[in-house]
Image (cartoon, helix red, strand yellow):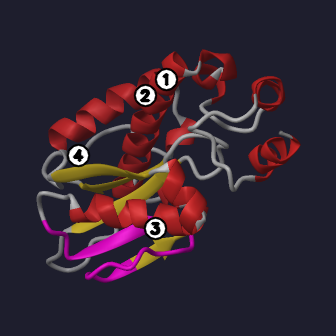
Amino acid sequence: MPELIVPGGLVCGIDEAGRGPLAGPVVAAAVILDPARPIAGLNDSKKLSERKRVALADLIRQNALAWCVAEASVEEIDRLNILQATLLAMQRAVAGLSVRPESALVDGNRCPRLDIPVEAVVKGDGKIASIAAASILAKTVRDAGMLALHAQYPQYGFDRHMGYPTAAHCAALQAHGASPVHRKSFGPVAQQLSLL
């Protein structure tokens, strides 16, 4: 997978996981890959099996020049809206890098405000290695977080749908109402709350 290299510059790839779910935080990751230690098999996290994602996440942590995972909470999502909360999580991920990048490439069509040049790349997680690496870290960290939330709120089945609005999740919402980790600003959750 090609890496867009800015002349003489360290590029960080940025991606997020969890914009669409009805529950849990949105998680973003920023990764600066080491050209001397390429990682085989990087791809959009959605195109990889869970086992492959977890194995690659370990390789990314071991071989990247720098990486950071950050999130925006359910409260921040409800207060700001999901887009602004996502951009905030991305800013936090870049700010947390142990090495300062000279530029950034972000998956999608919206860029967080950073103090370095940043460019949006549509479907970047399938085109650019560092964005793919960020997508893998964001997804694996978010999935682990949703499994932890499942232990607290087993009635919703977070271990199966990770908070996405599946039929089973919507049925659980109807049966049990919203939990403290549900996004109250999201339609199906707001609808449930209005029924109470």
Are the residues flagged by discs 2 and 1 in contact, CB closer than 8 Å?
yes
* First-in-chain label (3 vs 1): 3
Q: Amino acid at mark 2?
A: Ala
Residue 138 versus residue 115 in the image, above or below: above
Residue behind mark 3: 87
Query: How far, Cα to Cα, is label 3 from label 2?
Result: 21 Å
* Mark 3 residue element: helix
Query: Which part of the image, by quadrant, shows the C terminus?
Result: top right
In which quarter of the view is residue 60 placed?
top left
Q: Amino acid at mark 3?
A: Leu
Residue 136 versus residue 11 in the image, above or below: above
- Give the magenta-colored segment's residue range: 100-118
Whether residue 56 appears in this view of the structure is yes
* Mark 2 residue element: helix
The structure residue drawn at horizontal position 75% and vertical position 38%, both measured from the top left corner, is 165
Residue behind mark 1: 147
Q: Nearer the viewer, mark 4 or mark 3?
A: 3
The structure residue drawn at horizontal position 39% and vertical position 36%, both measured from the top left corner, is 141
Q: Position of residue 44 (x, y in %)?
A: 50, 46
Residue behind mark 2: 144
* Mark 1 residue element: helix
**Residue 165 shown in magenta:** no
**Residue 110 shown in magenta:** yes
Query: How far, Cα to Cα, is label 1 from label 4?
Result: 30 Å
* First-in-chain label (4 vs 2): 4
Residue behind mark 4: 38
* First-in-chain label (3 vs 2): 3
Q: Position of residue 195 (x, y in %)?
A: 87, 42
Q: In this view of the protein, which residue sits in the foreground, 72 or 136?
A: 72
Residue 143 versus residue 132 in the image, above or below: above
